[in-house]
Amino acid sequence: MSVKDESLGFSLPELAIVLVVIGLLVGGMLMPLATQIDLRRTAQTRRSLQEARDALLGFAVANGRLPCPAAAGSGGAETSAGPCPLSAGGVADGFLPGVTLGLSPSDSLGYVLDAWGNRLRYAVSAAPAAAPGSFTSSNGISNFWRANGAPPAADLQICWDSVSISRPGSAKADCAAGSALSRAAVAVIYSTGRNTATSGRGPDEAANLNGDRVFVAHAEAPEGASGGEFDDLLIWLSPNILYNRMVAAGRLP
């Protein structure tokens, strides 16, 4: 073979080295791209949760109450206007009523979606026991305040982890002392995250889907963590913010 012929292409060993280098470069680019997509979806979902909380506040100002959750067969609308259907754990828990709140994006049935295409979930306090449904009945908050000289006390709790929850799944579920992010949330709005776990990938995620009044919120955790894989995104509505907005709008007391 002449010198000219040898310069026309790569030898097999050289070609193999080039392919390996290209493979390493492409593989190194794919992981950051996947991470960037996931970060964008996480940020988009957080914005959707914030918009949902704002919509709940607007609904309360306009209607003097919070909506009930949507059920699987309610077409994205709240199940009722008044005392909501309760789970065995004593909480009104279901999907965010996107049709009732006028939110998007939604699926073909009207349920609000997160950036992974999962339906956003929503729970609202059924407390107080003396007047259940005060938060979701027409003028229920105002009526309770006028009758008792104080607004109704909400009872949804948010814990650091599921280990801190006693009597999970029951109406007496409770967050241990020193482990609560909130003990008096009026409502909780959350996404089941990238893993789309409808029953939870671990005990921490499962705690958000067991129908009691206690929820878990913390940073994302991988499979094998003490509380199991966790990628739920959760925010809650403080009663102080709710009452402030309703007082300013003349809805309370």
Image (cartoon, grey):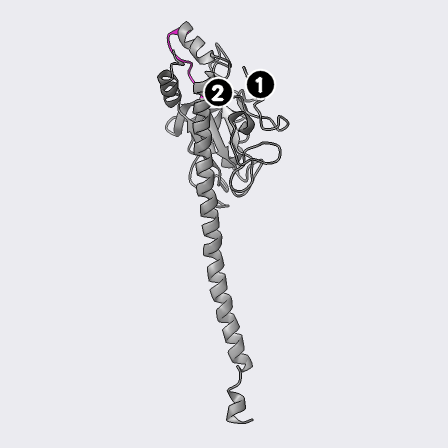
Percent position (x, y) of residue 146? 40, 7
Percent position (x, y) of residue 3? 50, 92
Query: Where is residue 176, by image quadrant?
Result: top left
Query: Is residue 145 inside the magenta stretch?
Result: no
C-alpha distance separating marks 1 and 2: 11 Å
- Mark 2 is surrounded, within 10 Å at the Cα level, by few (under 14), some (14 to 19) or many (20 or more) other residues, namely many
**Amino acid at circle 2:** Leu
Residue nearest the viewer, comparing 11 with 157: 11
| Tag 2 secondary structure | loop
In the rendered image, the residue lying farthest to the bottom is 2
Q: Mark 2 highlights which residue? A: 66
Q: Give the range drawn in magenta.
A: 148-155
**Amino acid at circle 1:** Ser
- For the question of whether residue 243 can be seen, the reply is yes
Left or right: where 62 falls relative to 93: left
Percent position (x, y) of residue 57? 43, 24
- Mark 1 is surrounded, within 10 Å at the Cα level, by few (under 14), some (14 to 19) or many (20 or more) other residues, namely some
| Residue 176 image label | none
Using the image, determine if residue 242 lies above or below residue 48: above
Q: What residue is at 45 percent from the left and 46 percent from the top?
A: 40
| Residue 80 image label | 1
Percent position (x, y) of residue 11? 54, 82
Residue nearest the viewer, comparing 143 with 215: 143
Mark toward the start of the polypeptide (1 vs 2): 2
Task: Report the predominant secondary structure element of the magenta stretch.
Answer: loop
